[in-house]
Image: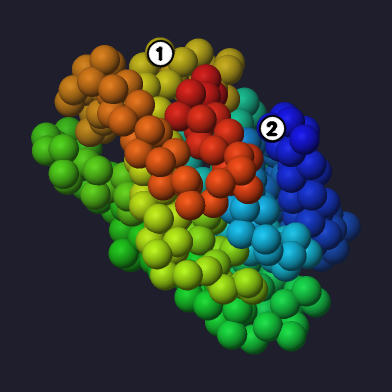
Amino acid sequence: MTLDKKIDEYTHRIERALERWLPGPETPPRRLHEAMRYSVLGGGKRIRPLLIYASGDALGTDPESLDAPAVAIELMHAFSLVHDDLPAMDDDDLRRGRPTTHKAFDEATAILAADALQPLAFQVLVSDPALQDLPQSQADLVRLIAEACGSEGMTGGQAIDLASEGQQLDAAELEHMYRLKTGRLLRASILAPTCLPPELELSGRHSLEHFADCIGLAFQIRDDILDVEGETEVIGKQQGADIARGKATYPAMFGMAGAQRRVTELLEAALADLDFLGERADTLRGLARVIAERDR
């Protein structure tokens, strides 16, 4: 099956699963549920669920058991985007080519919608029928995702990002911020299938962890590049927003050529990490290239 067909298959699967778990728009409180659905179902690349399904394919994981972590991680990602867009943080008006949640509804409703998405993610993990006979896997997934999103993960990375506006970071500090803000949830996506049968040998897990680290950094640096050279209509958010806020970015520190070189280095290292999986990881390899070379 071609990469495009695999992506279509995975995308249809996650969209069905998200629709199944999100409260219906007619369920009270209606406005809150409408805002939750707006925040989650409004398009997006679905990179994190795609990585979960591709990693699971490579490891021979039962696809039915991958739906819950795919939904949970996408809900956590949506929660983070709604909060990041708020006036108190990045103050963005555009997300995925349409008004951000606080613009489409109001600031209070956006905060509540994001707050409700976070516990729903963990509700999915402990309630999905496909995981009911796998209590250790449920606990491992809860731990993996909670750690990825906490103060030493995504939330901590956002705090560093806000604090560094107008500041000069060195390369190590910038990459540390990226590993937390973006990389930890991408890492959780790639490693989620390792929480499920069959068990992966320790050497294979280490290779997959390094792959995840490289791809997480490549993803954020590519985002930096698109903030400079992308078009608002294509990338779905305001081009140049990071520059306008004085954010520390890879192109600002090393130039566009230096940023692109770093993405290429990271991609090559990531692909080498998948050698132990052979052809089974071809879809994962394809997604790595999509992440490093995307135009939106």
Occupied quadrant, residue 283:
top right
Q: Position of residue 106 (x, y in %)?
A: 60, 45
Judged from the image, the secondary structure of the residue bearing numbered disc 1 is: helix
Please give the residue where the numbered disc 2 appears in the rendered image: 3
Kind of residue at badge 1: Glu
Q: Position of residue 172 (x, y in %)?
A: 16, 44
x 85%, y 63%: residue: 27
Q: Position of residue 232 (x, y in %)?
A: 52, 17
Q: Is there any visible trace of residue 107 in the rendered image?
A: no
x 42%, y 21%: residue: 226
Task: Using the image, tell me which numbered label, if any, was put on residue 171.
Answer: none
x 31%, y 45%: residue: 178
Please give the residue where the numbered disc 1 appears in the rendered image: 229
If the image is split into quadrants, where does the N terminus sit?
A: top right
Occupied quadrant, residue 165:
top left
Q: Is there any visible trace of residue 147 in the rendered image?
A: yes
The relative height of residue 258 versus residue 50 in the rendered view (above or below) is above
Q: Farthest residue in the right direction?
A: 26
The relative height of residue 137 versus residue 75 in the rendered view (above or below) is below
Q: Left or right: 15 with respect to 115? A: right
If the image is split into quadrants, where does the C terminus sit?
A: top right
How crowded pointer 2 is (Cα within 10 Å; few <14, some 14-19, many 20+) is rated as: some
Occupied quadrant, residue 105:
top right
